[in-house]
């Protein structure tokens, strides 16, 4: 039985179901809270921290925190929006993101968030990290330059036994995503395509894909800002 | 298939949650974790290779390449440098013929840096093949390397006598010293092992919790959560079983008091775990012990065995029908972040030590999904005294908000480094007088994640209401370059120890370190100080305590030692990228012979 809960986001009265995450509950109330590492239907991880909201003076990630009765959530306040923009800038400056040459340009969630948050010149110094492009996999290319380490591929792509095809390696700023070449050797074309779609950026690409086939103007985020579909939905 | 490895995996019932033990044993047996070994482990445990490697590569004592027949891990914490670490390291490199991070050509010696190994009162210190070497000097290093070349076993390399107390017992045989400088209720040896257990089993578990609550004791790891409340939450959480964890992962640079408790008062600690087990109705306790203290393993296991023999651990403890509680030791493998309770649980389950999202809290869903309490070594020891003498008695120590005593690990520029058990409420000045700290420029209270205070704040007192601390006190005299020798070292520490999961913690400290170096080199401007302060708020979005405090070394000195920063920056310049064309092209000019 679904139990309804009342809560507030930025003063707006909202209703949600018990157990729902703040992100999902906000969505049902047509409020967009930006996410990057979150994927519907998969256990959230709170890795990118972009969905941070403030409850009772404390920051928490809206993807991992369930709503509670009477919760008063701050989301679109200037300081939280600035925090989110800072996180986007940190991701842009950490990796090597050259949008014009990337086949995900226009369909990339990080880029779309950059536009939504009107990022011009990041406040942080570019790190120009030395990263590699890995092409040892028969079907996939892993471009570490673009990887934002959100763990979506780790959490979503498993084999029939539940074993991870992707995993983190190392720790701290050395961390990177590794593909299990042995397990993923027999990936079907469809599975490989799904893997690329799980990635919010252009870090997992098909070797024989149809990149760049969407002309400018027909790409996902060409006309509407990311999240606007949630905000404009009629009840 | 390798039979030795097969036996190791079978020993842990092919259980992937025991991966840490499997990897530790594998490395012990083969020196490092070879490709074929990794394949075999992954296959037997039915996990993918990358999944296995994400655990291996998380911990810095694990390696997939040979790290030499003799692997030398030299502590690189700030206090080691205060006591001559630079010369020691140089001598190691010269004698071994390789740099840190490398293995010598003949494969004999591997040199590696490591974060604080809990020997700050006897630095410079190193761990060589699991054996601790303290008070290293360039001369001693030459002797060690000569011994290595002669094929002497590490255990036989000692020339001086072993340390004090149990350090010289047959089961430890370490050159480590306890340096117990001041005793209080915990370190005093008046405990008769088992007294508290016998007392609790005659009362109701909930009443034990009430007594703990009455004592007002708070977690001694640093966070200060009320222990009684934690136990109460756990007891009220439903689960198939419950677990008691003792957090002995003391990784905060400058702390070593848990090492001393483990060496001198292990029965007290285990008794505390049994009491916790009784109170929350758990049947298993796990001592999560940092790998740096592996030299205590045999000794601690013998104590557990002795307590089993005395029916203080095991089945029907103290004769109480149905009160069963076992304790085992779980080793980590080198990761500061595992001191965070949920990361510790992840690690104990054989995974990367990444902190979990909350909710759920460990008291609801902890180890293997069951309600779990994680308590600091010192907290559990104090509980034994609370049980024997009562919560009211315990409250007679310390202040109203901070009851009881605290073990301080004092190191740095002072005459008497070591462990001091003091009541909460001692002022910093009292402590400096006690430990022989003179011409003190600063005291780092609570380790790098705590705060760095100057003489104008030495009147402040230790306590949750004022200067909260997990016990690390590093004294820095006025000859030290605070920014270069301390702040930069601590910042590097946090960069190395971040798990890398949260974006701000993975990226921002690196940018801050760049700023700090820029300032130290005299290229900084006012804008840099403003950026540091403005950006620091982003760290609050991180998941765990490490992420929240990783910038504290910079922030607390920027607040309390602002003049040091102001003296370094260029006052007449408003903007400076830090880039110097002359320096950048210096090598090029040299090569091309152009000016």
Image (tube, coloured by chain):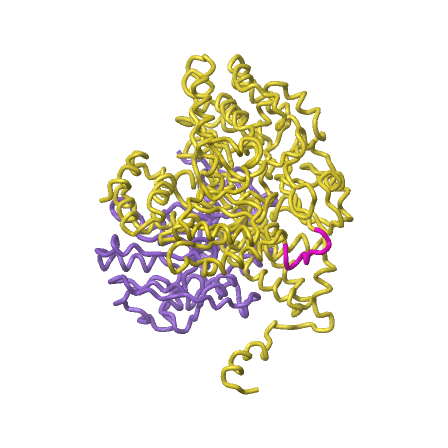
Chain colours: A purple, B yellow
Q: Identify the residue shown where x is 70% and y is 54%.
A: B559
Relative to B530, is B291 on the left or the right? Answer: left
Residue A194 lies in the magenta-colored region: no
Is there any visible trace of residue A3 in the rendered image?
yes
If the image is split into quadrants, where does the N terminus of chain B sit? top left
If the image is split into quadrants, where does the C terminus of chain B sit? bottom right
Q: Looking at this view, is B149 or B405 the one in front?
A: B149
Horizontal and vertical percent for residue B382? 60, 27
B407 over A155 or under it: above or below: above
Q: Identify the residue shown where x is 50% and y is 66%.
A: A127
Relative to B422, is B100 on the left or the right? Answer: left
Residue B482 lies in the magenta-colored region: yes
Horizontal and vertical percent for residue B160? 55, 41
How many circles with numbers are drawn on the protein?
0
- Residue interval drawn in magenta: B477-486
Residue B81's image quarter?
bottom right
Q: Looking at this view, is B381 or B100 the one in front?
A: B100
Is there any visible trace of residue B497 in the rendered image?
no
Horizontal and vertical percent for residue B124? 57, 49
Relative to A217, is B220 on the left or the right? Answer: right
Residue B380's image quarter?
top right
Horizontal and vertical percent for residue A87? 52, 58
Q: Identify the residue shown where x is 56% and y is 20%.
A: B208
Relative to B443, is B594 on the left or the right? Answer: left
Q: Residue reaching furthest bottom?
A: B594
B85 over B20 or under it: above or below: below
Q: Looking at this view, is B319 or B551 the one in front?
A: B319
């Amino acid at each position: 039985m679904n139990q309804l809960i009342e809560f507030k986001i930025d003063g707006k009265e909202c209703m949600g179901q018990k157990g729902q995450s703040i992100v999902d509950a906000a969505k049902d109330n047509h409020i967009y809270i930006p996410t990057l590492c979150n994927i519907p239907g998969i256990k959230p991880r709170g890795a990118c921290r972009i969905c941070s909201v403030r409850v009772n003076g404390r920051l928490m990630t809206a993807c991992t925190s369930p709503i509670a009765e009477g919760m008063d959530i701050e989301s679109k306040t200037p300081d939280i929006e600035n925090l989110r923009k800072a996180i986007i800038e940190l991701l842009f400056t950490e990796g090597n993101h050259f949008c014009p040459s990337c086949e995900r340009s226009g369909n990339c969630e990080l880029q779309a968030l950059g536009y939504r948050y009107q990022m011009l010149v990041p406040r942080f110094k570019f790190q120009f990290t030395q990263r590699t492009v890995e092409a040892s996999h028969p079907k996939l290319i892993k471009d570490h330059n673009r990887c934002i380490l959100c763990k979506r591929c780790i959490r979503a792509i498993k084999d029939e036994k539940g074993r991870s095809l992707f995993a983190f390696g190392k720790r701290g700023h050395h961390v990177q995503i590794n593909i299990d070449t042995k397990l993923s050797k027999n990936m079907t074309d469809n599975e490989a395509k799904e893997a690329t779609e799980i990635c919010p950026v252009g870090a997992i690409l098909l070797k024989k894909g149809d990149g760049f086939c969407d002309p400018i103007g027909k790409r996902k985020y060409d006309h509407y800002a990311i999240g606007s579909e949630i905000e404009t939905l009629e009840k | 298939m390798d039979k030795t490895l097969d036996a190791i995996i079978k020993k842990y019932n092919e259980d992937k949650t025991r991966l840490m033990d499997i990897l530790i044993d594998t490395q012990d047996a083969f020196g490092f974790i070879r490709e074929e070994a990794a394949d075999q482990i992954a296959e037997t445990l039915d996990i993918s290779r990358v999944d296995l490697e994400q655990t291996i590569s998380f911990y810095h004592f694990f390696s997939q390449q040979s790290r030499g027949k003799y692997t030398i891990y030299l502590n690189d914490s700030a206090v080691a440098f205060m006591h001559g670490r630079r010369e020691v390291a140089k001598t190691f490199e010269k004698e071994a013929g390789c740099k840190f991070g490398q293995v010598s050509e003949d494969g004999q010696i591997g040199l590696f840096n490591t974060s604080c190994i809990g020997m700050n009162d006897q630095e410079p210190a190193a761990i060589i093949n699991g054996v601790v070497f303290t008070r290293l000097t360039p001369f001693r290093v030459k002797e060690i390397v000569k011994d290595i070349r002669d094929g002497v076993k590490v255990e036989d390399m000692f020339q001086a006598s072993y340390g004090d107390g149990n350090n010289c017992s047959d089961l430890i045989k370490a050159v480590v010293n306890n340096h117990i400088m001041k005793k209080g209720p915990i370190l005093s040896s008046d405990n008769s092992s088992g007294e508290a257990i016998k007392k609790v089993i005659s009362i109701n578990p909930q009443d034990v919790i009430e007594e703990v609550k009455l004592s007002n004791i708070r977690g001694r790891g640093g966070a200060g959560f009320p222990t009684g409340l934690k136990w109460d939450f756990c007891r009220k959480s439903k689960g198939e079983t419950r677990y008691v964890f003792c957090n002995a992962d003391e990784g905060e640079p400058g702390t070593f008091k848990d090492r001393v408790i483990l060496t001198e008062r292990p029965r007290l600690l285990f008794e505390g775990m049994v009491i916790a087990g009784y109170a929350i109705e758990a049947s298993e306790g796990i001592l999560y012990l940092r790998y740096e203290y592996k030299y205590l393993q045999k000794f601690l296991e013998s104590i557990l065995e002795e307590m089993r023999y005395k029916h203080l651990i095991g089945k029907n403890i103290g004769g109480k029908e149905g009160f069963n509680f076992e304790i085992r030791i779980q080793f980590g493998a080198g990761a500061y972040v595992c001191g965070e309770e949920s990361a510790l649980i992840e690690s104990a389950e054989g995974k990367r030590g990444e902190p979990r999202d909350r909710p759920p809290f460990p008291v609801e869903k902890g180890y293997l999904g069951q309600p779990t309490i994680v308590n600091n070594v010192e907290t559990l020891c104090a509980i034994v005294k609370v049980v024997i003498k009562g919560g009211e008695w315990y409250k007679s120590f310390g202040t109203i908000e901070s009851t009881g005593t605290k073990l301080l690990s004092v190191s740095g520029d002072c005459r008497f480094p070591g462990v001091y058990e003091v009541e909460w409420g001692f002022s910093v000045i009292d402590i400096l007088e006690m430990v022989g700290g003179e011409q003190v420029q600063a005291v780092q209270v609570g380790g790098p994640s705590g705060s760095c205070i100057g003489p104008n704040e030495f009147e402040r007192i230790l306590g949750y209401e004022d200067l909260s601390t997990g016990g690390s006190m590093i004294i820095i005299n006025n000859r030290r370059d605070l920014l270069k020798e301390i702040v930069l070292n601590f910042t590097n520490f946090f960069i190395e120890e971040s798990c890398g999961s949260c974006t701000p913690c993975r990226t921002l400290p690196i940018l801050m370190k760049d700023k700090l170096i820029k300032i130290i080199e005299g290229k900084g401007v006012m804008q840099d100080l403003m950026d540091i302060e403005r950006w620091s708020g982003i760290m609050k979005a991180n998941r765990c305590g490490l992420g929240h405090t990783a910038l504290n070394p910079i922030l607390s000195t920027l607040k309390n030692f602002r003049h040091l920063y102001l003296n370094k920056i260029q006052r007449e310049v408003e903007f400076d990228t830090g880039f110097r064309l002359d320096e950048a092209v210096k090598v090029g000019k040299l090569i091309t012979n152009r000016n």
